[in-house]
Image (spheres, helix red, strand yellow):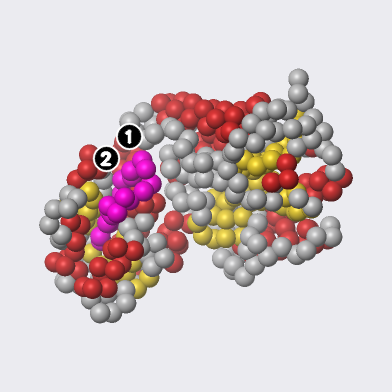
Amino acid sequence: MDRIGRTAVKIMFAENLQKLKKKMSENNIDLSIITDDDSIYYFTGYHDFLHMDFYRPTLLIISNDYQTYLITPLLDVLLVPENCPVDKVETWNDGIGNEWRELLPQIINRHKNIFIEKFKINQMVKTYLDELFNQEPGDLTTIIDSIRMIKSDYELNIARHAGQVGMAMMEAAKKTIRNNVPEYEIALAQSQAGTRKAAELLQKYYPENINMSPNIHFLPVITSGQDLPKTHHRASTKIIKKGDPIFVCYCGSTNFHRFKLGFDRIFWVEEIQSDEQIKAFETAVKSQKAALEVLGPGVTAEEVHAAYAETIQAEGYPYPTFRCGRGTGFSFLEEPQLVVGNKTVLEPGMVFAVDGGASANNFRSQVGDSFIITKDGYEQITHHSKKIEDLIISNG
C-alpha cells in the first residue's frame, strides 16, 4: 500500500463535499447547515482534538450557489487544513460581538429551503436558527447517511489500518490479563499498543498528515467477573481473579485517523468456572457465524439480523431484537444498522461491525469483528481467535 499524500486527502474531502452539493441540487435544497463534528470532518477534513465544543460551535454552510463557509472559533483556526475544500473560512471570538451568529443572518436571509442534520445539530445553533426564520428547516439526516454509507477507496484503506490498530490493542490486552491484575492496567497496555501502532501507520502511510494524532484516547470498555452484563462498563481499579471472564470491547477506541471500528472478545483467567458461560460463548460464536454466512452485497440488513437471531433462539435463548451490527466509519454509529425492520440493501464499500452474543446468569457473551462489503462477499479487517482454548489465559 503506497503512501497517501496530501493530494489524495484533498481529493477525498472535495469529492465528499461534491456528493453533498449534488444531492442538494437533486432535492432543491437552497442551504445546508452542519454542526456535527464527524460530518464536518467528512466533508472538509477539519477536526479538533477534544471532541467537545465548550459552547464554541463550528458551522459548515453550503448554499445552492455552491458557496461554502466554515465558521469556526479563532482559537482553532490554525487547525483548518490548507487543503480544506471550502470557499471561505470565517472566525469568531469568545465574547466579542454576536460571536458565531454574526454572519448567519446575511447568509440565511438569501435562502428559503434550508436543511440541517435534525438530530445532530448543535442546540445553541438550532435555537438561534428558530429565531431567524419561522418555518421548520428540512432534515439532512437521510441524505448525509446515504452519502457516508459507501466508503471511498481512501476511507477503506483507513478502515484496514484501524483494524491493525485494534489487533495490536487486543494482543496487548491478552498479554496483560492475569490473576491479580487491575482492569485499568489492561486499559493502559492496550492504549499504549494502539497508539504505537497508529503512530507507525501514520508515519509510513500518511506522512503529510502531521496534525492527525495517533493517541488512542476514547475510554475503552473493559469489564470482568459478574460485571459482564454492564455493557459499557469502563476499566476500573477492580482486581481480576482466577476464573473471571474479561470482556474487552473496542467500539470507538480503535479510533485511527478518526475511523471507528467494532472489535470484541472475551478472555478467561486460567479456567472457566461455569458450563453456562461455555454455552453462551459458543452460541455467540455460532450467531456471528450465521450472520456472516448471509453478509454480503444484495441482502438486506434485516436478513443478516434474522440469521443471527434465529441461531440464538435455536439454542434456547430469547429471540434478540437488538441489532447484531452497525455501519461504522468516521462516526461510532452509522447507517445501516443490522436490525429487525431495516430493509437497506447492502452494497460494496459499506463497513460493518458484526457481533454475536448470548447471556446467562451474571454473564454476557459477545464476539465482534469489522468487515468491508465487497462485490462478492466481505473482507474481514479484524482478526483474533474465537477458540475457547485460545481465550483461556494461563498465569505463567
Residue 177 percent coordinates (x, y)? 68, 29
Which element carries disc 2, helix, strand or loop? helix
Dot 1 falls on a residue whose secondary structure is: loop
Q: Residues within 10 Å of mark 1 (few under 14, many from 20)?
A: few
Picture coordinates of residue 276, whole percent (x, y): 84, 48
Q: Which quadrant holds residue 208?
A: top left
Badge 2 is on which residue? 79
| Numbered badge on residue 211 | 1
**Outermost residue, right side:** 275
Residue for point 25% across, 43% down? 76
| Residue name at image x 60 percent, y 49 percent | 232
Disc 2 to disc 1, how far (Cα)?
8 Å
- Residue type, label 1: Asn
Task: Residue at 21% x, 73% y: name it.
Answer: 132
**Looking at the image, residue 139 lies above or below residue 54:** below
The picture places residue 70, in percent across and down from the top left corner, at 23, 53
**SS majority, magenta:** loop
Q: In which quarter of the image is the C terminus?
A: top right
Magenta highlight range: 44-62
